[in-house]
Amino acid sequence: MGASCVLCETPGVLCIVTDLGKRHRINCSSPRCGNYVITDNAMGRLSTGGPQKSVLIEMVRRANKHSKVLEIFVAGDGLLQAYELPRD
Ligand SMILES: [Zn+2]
């Protein structure tokens, strides 16, 4: 598929859509980035500014390093948040 990484814009990433299109599981091939899950809402938030993508990329890489996957989502207070999920 022709998707690009939401965080580092590397083209040709593998993107699996789950939960009726609400979550996207991204496998980015860039060595500076990695595997993460991002919700639709969080994608929208990133496209309108929000936190530094470089910070999120750093968190993705750190999570992957100890066999976790970063999930990026919009919390109840409307802020973008991320936490580490066990890799499944
Ligand atoms: Zn990436």
Image (cartoon, grey):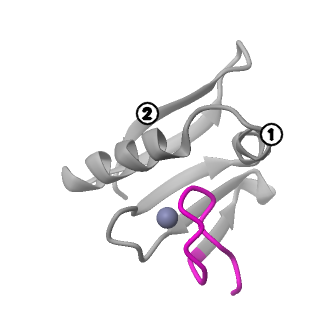
Q: Quadrant of residue 29?
A: bottom left
| Residue at mark 1: C-beta within 8 A of ligand 1 | no
Judge whether residue 60 is colored magenta. Answer: no
Q: What is the quadrant of the N terminus in the image?
A: bottom right
Neighbor class of circle 2 (other Cα within 10 Å; few <14, some 14-19, many 20+) is few
Q: Which picture quadrant has residue 2?
A: bottom right
Q: In the image, 77: left or right of 53? A: right
Q: Is residue 52 left or right of residue 43?
A: left
Above or below for 63 versus 9: above
Label 2 element class = strand
Q: Residue at x 53, y 61 (%)?
A: 8
| Front residue of this view, candidates 2 and 40 | 2
The stretch in magenta equals: 1-14
* Image location of residue 37, percent across then percent down: 54, 53
Distance CA(mark 1)–CA(mark 2) = 21 Å
Q: Is mark 2 within 8 Å of ligand 1?
A: no
Relative height, residue 73 to residue 10 (above, below): above
- Disc 1 marks a residue whose amino acid type is Thr
Q: Are discs 1 and 2 less than 8 Å apart at CB? A: no
Left or right relative to 67: residue 21: right
At label 2, the amino acid type is: Tyr
Which of pointers 1 and 2 lies earlier in the amino acid sequence? 1
> Residue at position x 48%, y 70% from top?
27
Which residue is the site of mark 2? Answer: 83
Query: At x 34% / y 55%, what residue is drawn?
Result: 87
Callout 1 secondary element: loop
What residue is at 43 percent from the left and 62 percent from the top?
35
Q: Is residue 13 rendered magenta in the image?
A: yes
**Dividing the image into 4 quarters, which one contains the C terminus?**
bottom left
Residue 77 image position (x, y, % from top left): 71, 12
Mark sitting on residue 48 = 1
Label 1 crowd (10 A; few <14 / some 14-19 / many >=20): few
